[in-house]
Image (cartoon, rainbow, N blue to C red):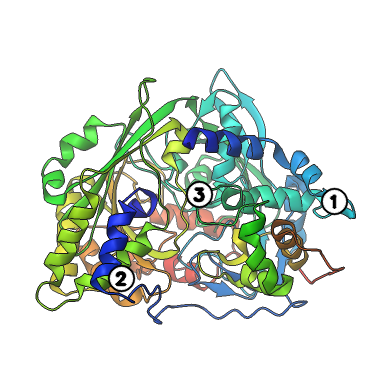
Amino acid sequence: MKRGVTRRAFVRGSLAAAAAGLAPGCRTTTTGAAVEVAAPFTPGQPLPWRNWAGNQACRPAARAAPASEEAMLAFLARGEGALRPVGSGHSFSALVPSDGTLVASDLLSGLIASDDERLQADVWAGTRLHQLGPLLQAHGQALPNLPDMAYPTLGGALATSTHGTGPRFGSLSTMVEALVLATPSGERLECSRAQNAEVFQAARCSLGALGVVTRVRLQSQRAFRLVETARFEALEAVLEDVERRREAHRHFELFAFPHASLAQVVETDEDDGSATPEGEEDPAAVYLLRDVYRAVGGLRGLGGFLYDRTLRLASGAAETRRVGPSFEVLTHARIARFREMEYTVPADAGPACLREVLATIRERDIPVVFPLEYRYVKGDDVWLSMFHGRDGCSISVHQYADEDHRPVFAAIEPIFWKYDGRPHWGKLHSLDATRLAALYPRWQDFREVRRALDPGGRLLNAHLHSVLGA
Amino acid sequence: MRGLRVTWLRSLLGAGAIALAAVAVRADGPLLAERQARLFQQACAHCHLRPGLGVPVLGDAAAWEERRARGLETLLANTVLGVGDMPPLGTCGACTEDDLRRLVAFLAGLPLPGATGAP
């Protein structure tokens, strides 16, 4: 996710000098146009809920956090009224808000059992991804791929087909061999390709609309080490060569800089033991990037040229190299908060789509400087996965959390539609059920499973009514 | 440099909830119950046990000094609603007000009044 420059050294000193020298006093960090959802807090009163990005909020009537699977089943069996599962709150879309009960799986976390021959592990679904790596490594295992941040719960990540990058790897949902679903009526369903197979295909990416996943059997591989190299290059040269590059590395992604001709290229491969770390991450560098743009980018006539030159000078030959266990290299700290829209287009359409997005930003002078992220993900057979039936290229657009993302996303989203894009379920988009149904061949199958498990619509909030048409 | 950090982090994270609960025991009694120690590992540890992020780290007295001066109630409100790069609720969906009050006090090194709060 999102931070290219947020997470890599970006010759901070040069950028800071540029920002300060060209426009003294311009180091503001807000524009006053943020979209924050009101959710007042009064001690002693029920807690409000807000998501990580601060653009979704609710005041649930009750909260629950069962500390065992039995307690979760009993809670669901006796409960009445609206209910929504909640993980770490990292989704930008309105998957969680409810005025009913929010049920958290935070206390269902940790390793249950491991099969060191099959390289499989049973894990509680409330386990955070940042806990998962060390837990698996203790048994000589590691997931083949991970998202680039590790805040979400495993259950939340599966509910939205959260993914990393690499054309030979699917989303986290594809690494699930089996799972246990606690249904809205409190029934315990064991699901796999051989048992409750239709529920399994629906529950591997369910938007939390089928119940609460309590435990997951993950297929791992032997623990391994990676070396990640990040450098700055001319974007167009990278795109011209992108098919070769994506195949040449275990993981490949790039970050494209709006209003500039630059890209940060990130290539990750297995470490043969010879790599040494180089440079440091800078999770707050995206703020500096914005300062630079404000200092030079808005200058009439020459702004774009100066901004591009400044970034090129600041980036120079900078290269960072991160080396370590796979789960440490694949994930990154994300400190700067933002809002995000991501669509997955067919893999081969990726370069053209990215070019059109960047050209539109430049031609309409859309005020966004947060780097766009560009990744590849292998196709799968998960019914509501964004990668169902086709290899995908995921392109993410971000706006700082203290700025208004809406005009930026509204201007860019139609471009993704042209390229047959599917929106990430946990990120912002404007599609409703009618349009989403046309993107997913197994849409009706999912709806039937959902209706059978939750005929009363207990798990449906306003957003799910809209996107599922239920 | 990074190797040292990772080793340190791993030792802290790998110790698990039991060790953390032990750390959280003060002369005047345990500040974090086992539940809150687990929630700390889930939600807080990923940032507040990682030096170099610009986030105040557990045990860094200097980093917490100015924040402590704001008082527990202000830090609690900032935690619930989110402020700057601190995400709302510290990403803890399970936390009650009492959980958050204790976790904030633990991190900031503040005394905990006999507070109870509605979940």
| Residue A227 at least partly seen | yes
Q: Amino acid at mark 2?
A: Phe
Outermost residue, right side: B28
Question: Residue beneath label 2, please?
Answer: A409
| Residue occupying the point 18% across, 65% down | A307
Question: Foreground residue, A264 or A350?
Answer: A264
Q: Are marks 2 and 1 in contact (CB under 8 Å)?
A: no
**Element at badge 3?**
loop
Tell me the crowding category of disc 2: few under 14, some 14 to 19, or many 20 or more residues within 10 angstroms, Cα based: many
Identify which amino acid the numbered label 1 is placed on. Answer: Arg
Task: Kindly identify the residue that appears in the image at 43 percent across and 70 percent down.
Answer: A401
- Residue B13 image-quadrant placement: top right
Q: Is residue A35 above or below residue A248?
A: below
Where disc 1 sits, the SS reads: strand
Instruction: Determine crowd level at label 3: few under 14, some 14-19, many 20+ residues with C-alpha closer than 10 A.
Output: some
Q: Which residue is mark 1?
A: B26
Q: Dot 2 falls on which chain?
A: A
Closer to the chain start, of discs 3 and 1, is: 1
Image location of residue A213, percent across then percent down: 61, 48
Kind of element beneath mark 2: helix
**Residue carrying label 3:** B52
In the rendered image, residue A420, in percent from the top left (x then y), is placed at: 23, 57
